Amino acid sequence: MADDTSIFIGASRKPDDSYQRAEQLLLQYGNRHGLVTGATGTGKTVTLQILAEGFSNAGVPVFCADIKGDLSGIAMMGTAQDFLVKRAEQIKLDPYDFQEFPVIFWDLFGEQGHPIRATVSEMGPLLLSRLMNLTEAQEGIMNIAFRLADEEGLLLLDMKDLQALLANIAERADEIGSRYGNVTKPSVGAIQRTLLVLEQQGAAHFFGEPALRISDIMRTTRDGRGAISVLAADKLMMNPRLYATFLLWLMSELFEVLPEVGDPDKPKLVFFFDEAHLLFDEAPKVLVDRVEQVVRLIRSKGVGVYFVTQNPLDIPEKVLAQLGNRVQHALRAYTPREQQAVKTAAETFRPNPDFDCSTAITQLATGEALVSMLEAKGVPSMVQRTLIRPPSSRLGPITPDERRKLIQESPVAGQYDQVVDRESAFEMLQKKAREAQDAEEQARQAGSGGSRWTIPGFGNDDPAPQSGSRRTPAPRPSNRQTVAEAAIKSVVRSVGSSVGRAIVRGILGSLSRGR
């Protein structure tokens, strides 16, 4: 059974289907990442559940997404059911104890959990461009927008800030184009239309303040267990690009915030990325390279990333090579691509002479998997055909009333409920526009000789011109900017240098929190 240094996964079987040995995940290699794959209905969610339970009991905080709502049962104590008790006996799990786990529910839409928000600046131009599926030219304009925001001290917190900045860029297209390259109004307009679509899909709920504090997903309880943060993702999956972008942003933030710890006795946090194929679908090479870089480097921060998906071919080879702990549930091989997936999955394991891996993958029963975990010195163990242990928490979803009660009693209750809308780019650009308008009006009045109101016949008329003199013609309107306008634009351009701080961007282009 598991001890303080490992998590009990299940029991492997001999060729005659008798008990062989306990299969365990060593906590010291928990940050070497992992992969859980298998066709729909083969037991991936239960595997994710028992891994989350094991890490929590070991004092490791967990963050995971609940795609179908089934994972929410981890917050409630399990009950003895015949098939669960039978599985416990088969794998010699004695005693088979039931328990509930400390869970914090989150939801980008604030409906089934505490709201999760991030600022536009933290998201960065690369992830935003990915989220909006921008063209190369449009992505260039997005980078220019963030550069201007840095230089001019404009805080980009929510979507209206970005919309205001883009409108400002369109008005100053000639000036900005001479400094950073061609900026066309049609391209800016296309980005604005995409922002509108994104807003209608619910992304406006995600951008804003108060932004998520990483410390709130790295909590431990008084009894030393790690809190399990469960993201309600059933509605979020209606916009899979937002789901993938959010989880990638969260990984990037973890990388930026956490200090280097090398190889700890156990991870500081474990991150489960369910439906991982969504991250890589139609992703540009630069994004895949950044993901591979984050996965490779975040290990030294003590964070373990576990990808959960149906097909091992969903994960690029560069990323797949970083995943040391592997659980492979059954795959179906009816098409050439599925047959290739089975072959690929089999080839990634250290062979076992007792059975053919490719054949076994197609014959695994529900709740059974091929398991290979890192052993001493980080070497992958020989693959074993394993019966996965039953969970200690409830198998299946919780009720809406149970969820509401848990949210009300949560350690972060009330901290994220109210949106904070402080002065940012939207308000600052509005203020500058009013100031520029007032300055232009004053200059116009000064050029016309004053702004006195006159009523004919009441002594306020201009004196009649002397005989032989000529009336000064009214000034013609000019397309050239006034001195006041030029001064204001000069001040605006210099705002960035007067902020008195440098803004550093991280691996994925988001703002570093070390500011």
Image: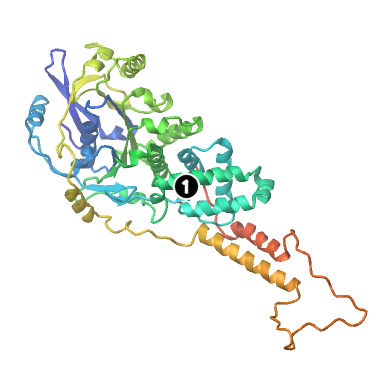
Residue type marked 1: Leu
**Looking at the picture, how far across and down is residue 76, in whole percent?**
15, 44
Q: Secondary structure at mark 1?
A: helix
**Looking at the picture, how far across and down is residue 464, in whole percent?**
83, 83
**Looking at the picture, how far across and down is residue 152, in whole percent?**
59, 56
Is residue 437 left or right of 428 when viewed as pictured?
A: right
> Quarter-wise, where is residue 7 in the image?
top left
Residue 351 vs 84, above or below: the answer is above
| Tag count | 1
Query: Which residue is drawn at the image coordinates 38% and 56% (left, top)?
Result: 210
Given residues 209 and 174, the one toward you in this image is: 174
Query: Which residue is drawn at the image coordinates 16% and 30% (left, top)?
Result: 389
Seen as rendered, the residue at the extreme front is 457
Query: Which residue is drawn at the image coordinates 16% and 22% (left, top)?
Result: 21
Q: Which residue is mark 1?
A: 196
Given residues 80 and 53, the one toward you in this image is: 80
Given residues 503 and 407, the one toward you in this image is: 407
> Quarter-wise, where is residue 182 in the image?
top right
